[in-house]
Image: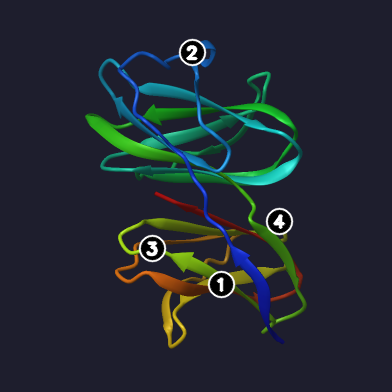
């Protein structure tokens, strides 16, 4: 089944300026990033290897926390309000992501510079723009999103099922321009359009049935 859903996705973000070295090196000094906001920062292995951030959610919700860095190896850690570690992403690159359901309240995020040198980064915390349910292989939901030329967009798709594999596509009215067909529980497309206008996000089931969550952020 193919469904063109009437909801038009809105993408609203706030960008927080980078902070001077040392200002947010501990949880008590954590800087605030708004939910559905993107913050800038810099971490250096020598002298300023850690940045702490905090975000408040007004209700239980699904979120994606992502780190978009430049160069080397950065790691991402996510904590609850009592600083219990709830998720981490410690791959070998500068881009990391964690996701899942959270409760109302404060949450803490640590960005750690693992490799030598320095890295500028963007940190985004997004709540789900929409959730849906796909009924079997081949079922597709399609959403419309206005995208501005020169703006970078991050589109995330998550699920929590071991038997459901949804894929993510970005298209114009004529053809697919980007896709993510990861077999895990998260897919991501990062795209900077050269032409402003309406684009289409498709979520399709490669196998199984299940619920999914869709997130969009931009800067």
Residue drawn at 71 percent across, 61 percent down? 131
Viewed as shown, does residue 91 lie left or right of 184? left
Residue 81 visible from this viewpoint: yes
Residue where numbered disc 3 is placed: 148
- Which label's residue is closer to the chain start, 3 or 2? 2
- Of residue 123 and residue 80, the one placed in the foreground of this image is 123
Residue where numbered disc 4 is placed: 160
Q: Secondary structure at mark 2?
A: helix
Viewed as shown, does residue 99 lie left or right of 219? right
Residue where numbered disc 2 is placed: 29
- Of residue 165 and residue 141, the one placed in the foreground of this image is 141
How far across and down, in percent of the image, does residue 108 sit?
58, 26
Residue where numbered disc 1 is placed: 144
Measured Cα–Cα span from mark 2 to mark 4:
33 Å
Residue drawn at 45 percent across, 56 percent down? 154
Measured Cα–Cα span from mark 3 to mark 2:
35 Å
Above or below, 26 against 102 in this view is above
């Amino acid at each position: 089944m193919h469904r063109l859903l009437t909801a038009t996705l809105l993408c609203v973000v706030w960008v927080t300026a980078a902070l001077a070295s040392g200002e947010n090196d501990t949880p008590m000094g954590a800087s605030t990033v708004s939910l559905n906001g993107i913050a800038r920062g810099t971490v250096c292995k020598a002298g300023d290897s850690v940045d702490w951030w905090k975000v408040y959610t007004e209700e239980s919700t699904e979120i994606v926390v992502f780190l978009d860095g430049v160069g080397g190896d950065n790691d991402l850690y996510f904590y609850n309000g009592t600083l219990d570690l709830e998720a981490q992403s410690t791959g070998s690159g500068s881009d990391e992501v964690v996701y899942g359901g959270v409760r109302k309240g404060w949450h803490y995020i640590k960005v750690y510079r693992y490799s030598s040198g320095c890295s500028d980064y963007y940190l985004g915390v997004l709540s789900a723009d929409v959730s849906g349910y796909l009924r079997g292989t081949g079922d597709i939901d399609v959403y419309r999103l206005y995208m501005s030329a020169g703006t970078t967009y991050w589109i995330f798709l998550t699920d929590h099922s071991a038997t459901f594999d949804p894929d993510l596509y970005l298209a114009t009215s004529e053809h697919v321009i980007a896709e993510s067909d990861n077999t895990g529980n998260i897919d991501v497309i990062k795209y900077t359009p050269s032409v402003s206008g309406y684009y289409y996000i498709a979520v399709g089931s490669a196998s199984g049935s299940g619920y999914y969550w869709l997130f969009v952020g931009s800067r």
